[in-house]
Amino acid sequence: MARKGRGKKKEEVEEEVPQPNWHAMSVEDVCVELGLTTELTSTGLTDAQAASRLEEYGYNKMTEARKKTLLERIWDQVANVLVFILVVVAVVSAVRAITAEDSDGIVTNWIQTGLICGVITMNTIIGIVQEGSAEKAADALKNMLSSDARIMRNGKETMIPASDIVPGDVAILGTGDRVPADLRMFSVANLANQEAALTGESVPIDKTTDAITIEGVAPEATPLGDRHNMAFSATLVAQGAGSGLVIATGDFTQIGTINALVSKVEKKKTNVLEQIDTVSKWLAFFIIISAIATFLVAFLVTGLDPIDSVSIALVCAVGMIPEGLEAIVTMTYAWAVSNMAKLNAIIRALPAVETLGSVTVICSDKTGTLTQNKMSLTGFVTSNARYRIDVNSKTRAPTNFVRDDSFNAERADHQLNSKTQAVIDDGPNTNKTKGGFANPMAVTELNTVHDGTTQHGGKSAVVSDPTPVGNGESPSQDFIKSALSGGVLCSKCVLGTDGGREGEIGNPTEISILRAAYFAGVDIEDLKSGAPIVGEVPFSSEYKFMATVHEPTPGVDSEAINGKLRVHVKGAPDRMVKLCNTQAKAGLMDEDEPIDLKYWTENIAILSSHGLRVLALCRASIDKSEVVAGDQLGPEFVNGKGAWLTIVGLCAIMDPPRPECIDAITEAHYAGVRVAMITGDHKDTAIAIGRTLGLVDEQYSEGITGPEMDALDEEELKEAVMKYNVFARSSPENKLQIVKALQAQKQVASMTGDGVNDAPSLKQADMGVAMGLEGTDVAREAAEMILADDNFATIVNAVREGRVVWDNLRKVLLVNTPINNAQGMSVLFGLAFGLNDTPLTPIQVLYSNLICAVTLGFVTAIEPAEEGIMRLPPRRVGKRLIGRYLFLRIALGTLTLIGCTVGSVFWVQALGYNLEEQRSQAFNTLDLGAISVCLSARFAYNSSFHPRLLKGNKFCWVSVAIVTILQIVITYTPGLNLVIFSMAPMTWYQWVIAIIFMIVTFIVMEIEKGIRRYLRERGTDTDDREYDPTFDAPEDEGDIPVNLPSGASKLKLTELNK
């Protein structure tokens, strides 16, 4: 049976067989494993072999997840007890309409039936629309796949549809190609692939062909970023060319495994929607009990016949069913979504807003999320000075360079007492594969210039020479042009438009030097065109440098070399310092001095300890006879002459943090939200970024790497995720483990990211947040929220909106629930206290139910944030909307409205008003009382006896006006009042009674608020924030499994539970 990794048809795979470790195998062993001979690498498959393998393994496509049908979606919306009760009421109303003898009864009952059916239809449509767009993550992944593939077939190079490629094919890659399947490379020529979307690494990965083994690491534990003899499906070729054997297609590629994970995650209702379901079930139970009690009172106490008693009981049921609750909850979400869209946060599923309000940890991807995903020159070190470069400046001026001799002048704290080579090995300037990524400019031999046995204090040489400028001053443009000319001229890269990324071509690390020179005011194109390349040593990862030869350039080179050629060399600093015997004094062009090897060695270590990539810029001069124009020089041109170069300076390069993220993270900390950074980059780089952003502090002083996490057991991993804020060299599997471990620790975890590798974690997290500008379609479709501006600060605004949604939903319940309860219970209590007929008709009840929810409920649904909302800790897990104090407030509001409504009816009955006039009194007293409850509920604690009641929510008084006008229209419109609503016009005295009870309701609710303010000042939890076993969900005793089952690759998950 074929192994899973080769692409065996999914329906034929009966059991999972461990996949070969292709990266750890020689090319010959790979051929044997594929059942082919080694001649395959030069001839490729034959058509017959390809056809046979296509039949065996299937097409190079990914399986799509099954989607719900429209009927299934409709059933999901109507399959609940409350809808069932409404259907029963509608059926009874229809039967009464058919059997009614008078025309008024026929019209009234048919209208009632139509209204109920309309309510059911409206709620069903809202529910279906609320689900958002259908899951598109699989489609987005599919769109990333190559459409065509260049392969070797029958000994000839040919183009075929990528879907027809099979395991065993020989795929040929060139610059700009999208890799068609997972490949084991056997031939490379300066090949580097851009894998940021898959691995998180911001620079292209150089590819090799030798088998890869890491000492102390099992082959299957090697992260994707270290498998640099592999090319992965859907990644892009950034430079060079190569050929590889197809070892996996379709669902069994790395991206195919992500597709399977994305497709298998089961979506779960948010806390609020689950609670609304729970509230609905309790309401259904309470409604049934109340309806039975109403029937018994009507039949046994009032003496009505059974049919009328059933009809009255159904009026009670209709009154208490919250027909408008689902609509107003959706409106609450929709309003928040609209506000967030204006702030560049796009919500893909409405309930996700509420989840943001309870997030306790934001797990953020580094590259492109917390950082700019733009390699930038942040510092430049000369023989006597250090220059800090403003990477966020939008103006082109030399003032972007400032001499700052304290800038990265000491080793990072965690490397103060480490040996020099150990510092390098821990940072981004190493070529050692320890769960990180290959670096073409790696430092490998610092101990050749320093034995590494001395323990360093960590400081660079103290300098005070004010050449060319003093500390705190900016050098001239000519100085910058001369100092960086080696990085500009010794480069084939093309800078993007206006110094940005659009249109740039080449290695991002090299482009960073061009960008720094550009924003210092240097004319890059003029400099290059004025110094064409005479000869060149192309870069290679074997010798780690590049060299170019030019005619002397005025303004860059001194007149002393006229008649000679200028050589610029750029490369790994350890290789360069070995080849230097002099240094440019203060970085100037005119004067050289003997090299201080110890100074440069320690500065390489210092910069590496801060997570910076380091390039050395060197120069020399040669006689014109040594090079002929157009010569392709070999590496011996540079490294075959002993120590003969002059080192100009060290370039310190990094992907800098987004400046706005610092303030955003600070605000998140004030709100009790922890921010953790998960990245595939090196530990020192991650810690340096984390320290800048405020993620690394006394409490979270260190970081942990993916390989270190792999060595932990489940309990240790749970402890680790609460101990560290920086997770470096993390694989996609590690990201999933971190999220699951946080969830196991009762944390509500959000995951932000932009790459394909983030998709499973975005789905697993309680709240997935993707980048809209730099992010991939896969990440966007896997997330619940998309940041349109890729600004981490937008997340803070989203958290605020999430908290507002929670507060406003509680206010909505405080308004809607008493109104609903009072509509039904007024019928019960009216009959129980001696009324001979129902004080409210079914149509009056339905109308009040809907109009109060849509208008008054909407007022509280869109209420702005109350002061201090971002100074409160996140809600605890399992907290329910209705707590002890909100329940008491709802009960008080219900009893007050019932008392006022029933009391007003008895008042006008005593004055001799007839049944229709009594119903008018009950109808208007109830709805005016509902206005009072709404006005009081706008503020959770602050008094509504205040001018603030008149401002802050522009829809408040519009809604009040709408309800009032509609009440008057219904009350006084002939036919509408008597025929449909079974009520009569009211006298002025009746309006006085209604207004009196309206004021009583408002005062009662405000007195309750004052009592809660008093209790709150004395430490009582009147916010319902603390755990209450009576109202809150019990603590979940079950553990979430953190360690993940084995599978096809380092993405070793077979199932995720949201």
Image (spheres, rainbow, N blue to C red):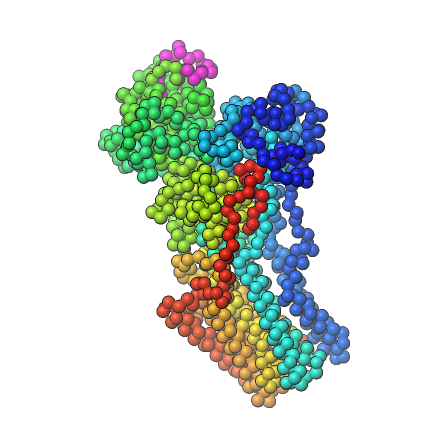
Judge whether residue 634 is colored magenta.
Answer: yes
Query: Is 998 left or right of 946, judged from the image as shown?
Result: right
Q: Quadrant of residue 281?
A: bottom right
- The residue under the point 45% across, 45% down is 717
Query: Is 1024 left or right of 179, judged from the image as shown?
Result: left
Q: Going by the picture, which residue comes out furthest to the top?
A: 625
Measured along the vertical axis of the image, is residue 844 above or below residue 223?
below
Measured along the vertical axis of the image, is residue 80 above or below residue 731?
below
Measured along the vertical axis of the image, is residue 198 above or below residue 72?
above
Tell me if I can see residue 126 in this picture. Answer: yes
Tell me if I can see residue 977 in this picture. Answer: no
- The residue under the point 62% across, 42% down is 139
Quarter of the image with the N terminus is top right
The front one of 689 and 4 is 4
Q: Residue 98's spot in the image, x, y percent? A: 76, 74
Q: In the rendered picture of this protein, how many numbered marks are placed on residues?
A: 0
Judge whether residue 317 is colored magenta.
Answer: no
Query: Is 291 left or right of 417, judged from the image as shown?
Result: right
- The residue under the point 35% across, 35% down is 609
- The residue under the point 49% across, 77% down is 1001
The front one of 840 and 789 is 840
Q: Residue 117's spot in the image, x, y percent? A: 68, 66
The front one of 457 and 977 is 457
Q: Residue 341's spot in the image, x, y percent? A: 51, 52
Q: Quadrant of residue 939?
A: bottom left
Q: Magenta residues?
A: 618-638
The front one of 408 and 1003 is 408
Q: Residue 626's spot in the image, x, y percent? A: 40, 11
Q: Going by the picture, which residue comes out furthest to the left?
A: 464
